[in-house]
């Protein structure tokens, strides 16, 4: 159906009629550019013009323009059928490590070597995009932990904030315990019910900073009903060139898999290992299968604005009328000049 957003503006529709009834009519002769003496050829032309000015079609045209303008001001809208929005009831916090070790380029993306943060963003973007109906939040941590995006249905904003994150933004060290503590506080402040709290922690190192021990934070998370899924980032082997030729190194030697596994087990979660982008994608596919809490679906009615149609019609009518008046005025000037010349030369 269609309706008006501001229907009260329709009370202005009869205003021209009221003005016409209250104010005296304007004299046709007032402000004339040329006053012709009685009996001259120009007098007939002037009287003919006055007659045409008073014709009903011109007044009806003005009424039409006014009506269209008032309709446009009242904002006509088309309200569609109700559309259901699925809400899973799942609330996810992503905690992403921005420490200095994330600069290690041991991931391949589209045939080129990229650092760990770029690979994390690439896979996490798709993961966030698929979370239709979930509330998602974002925590960035290094030496400090910061809540970059509170829990929200606005997945595009969360993706944008993650894409804008840079290594070292929160410091070069790694405060895993502080990140977990911030996640617990964020979920508590949001009033999330038990059984609906999920934290996905992505890091490539060990806890080297912060005031909170990661295992103590995990125990608190377990008591608060927060399930933590930990993801260890980094390749196991990387071939590098040195003075003695090619050699293999382990770029993930600093990854504390034992602590990450304990954090996940304490909270009823699971530890994942992401050695390349394919494993990263598989991890997110598994996380996609988390069972949501049952909630009712909400709905909304799509609204389409239609005000531009009557507004455009009014503008076109005014432009057409102005062009017509200009053409008629030019014709009259040529007719008056011809009549004057004929009268002068007899």
Image (cartoon, grey):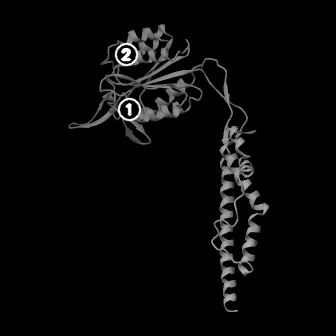
Mark 1 burial class by Cα count in 10 Å: few <14, some 14-19, many 20+: many
Task: Please give the residue where the numbered disc 1 appears in the rendered image.
Answer: 116
Depth check: give the residue in front, 266 or 94. 94
Residue 20 visible in the displayed image: yes
Q: Position of residue 232 (x, y in %)?
A: 40, 23
Q: Secondary structure at mark 2?
A: helix
Where is residue 262? Give x, y as percent.
Answer: 42, 12
**Quadrant occupied by the N terminus:** top right
- Name, please, the residue furthest toward the right: 56
Secondary structure type for disc 1: helix
For marks 2 and 1 on the same chain, the one whose residue lies earlier in the sequence: 1
Task: Tell me, yes or no, whether the two marked residues, 2 and 1, touch with CB atoms within 8 Å.
Answer: no
**Numbered disc in front, either 2 or 1:** 2
Question: Which residue is at the far left?
Answer: 243
| Location of residue 257 in the rendering, given as x and y in whole percent from the top left corner | 38, 18
In the figure, is residue 198 to the left or right of 41?
left
How many marks overall? 2
Of residues 161 and 306, the one nearer the viewer is 306
> Where is 38 relative to 282, above or below?
below
Place residue 97 in its image quadrant: top left
- Residue 74 in which image quadrant: top right
| Residue 309 visible in the displayed image | no
Classify the position of the C terminus by image quarter.
bottom right
x, y percentage for residue 124? 48, 31
Which residue is depicted at the point 46% across and 35% down? 160
> Is 222 rendered above or below residue 182?
above
- Residue lying at 41% horizontally and 37% vertically, measured from the top left: 108
Cα–Cα gap, marks 2 and 1? 21 Å
Q: Which residue is nearer to you in this view: 306 or 121?
A: 306
Question: Label 2, on which residue?
Answer: 177
Question: In the figure, 46 relative to 159: above or below?
Answer: below
């Amino acid at each position: 159906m269609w309706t008006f957003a501001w229907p009260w503006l329709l009370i202005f529709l009869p205003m021209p009629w009221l003005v016409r009834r209250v104010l005296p009519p304007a004299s046709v002769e007032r402000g004339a550019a040329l006053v012709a003496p009685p009996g001259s050829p120009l007098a007939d032309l002037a009287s003919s013009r006055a007659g045409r000015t008073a014709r009903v079609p011109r007044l009806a045209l003005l009424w039409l323009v006014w009506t269209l303008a008032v309709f446009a001001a009242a904002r006509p809208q088309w309200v569609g059928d109700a559309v259901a929005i699925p809400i899973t009831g799942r609330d996810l916090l992503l905690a992403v490590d921005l420490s200095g070790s994330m600069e290690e380029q041991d991931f391949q993306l589209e045939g080129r070597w990229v650092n760990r943060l770029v690979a994390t963003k690439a896979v996490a973007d798709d993961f966030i995009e698929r979370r239709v109906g979930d509330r998602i939040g974002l925590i960035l941590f290094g030496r400090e932990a910061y809540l970059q995006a509170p829990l929200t249905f606005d997945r595009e904003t969360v993706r944008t904030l993650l894409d804008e994150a840079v290594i070292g933004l929160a410091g070069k060290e790694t405060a895993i315990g502080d990140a977990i503590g911030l996640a617990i506080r964020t979920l508590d402040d949001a009033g999330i019910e038990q059984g609906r709290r999920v934290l996905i922690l992505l890091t490539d190192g060990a806890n080297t900073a912060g005031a909170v021990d990661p295992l103590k934070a995990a125990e608190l998370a377990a008591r608060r009903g927060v399930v933590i899924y930990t993801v260890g980032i980094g390749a196991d082997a990387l071939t590098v060139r040195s003075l003695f030729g090619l050699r293999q190194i382990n770029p993930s030697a600093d990854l504390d898999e034992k602590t990450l596994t304990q954090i996940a087990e304490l909270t009823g979660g699971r530890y994942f290992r992401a050695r390349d982008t394919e494993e990263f994608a598989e991890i997110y596919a598994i996380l996609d299968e988390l069972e949501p809490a049952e909630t009712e679906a909400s709905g909304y009615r799509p609204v389409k604005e239609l005000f531009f149609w009557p507004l455009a019609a009014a503008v076109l009518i005014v432009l057409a009328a102005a062009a017509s008046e200009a053409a008629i005025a030019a014709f009259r000037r040529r007719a008056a000049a011809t009549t004057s010349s004929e009268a002068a030369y007899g």
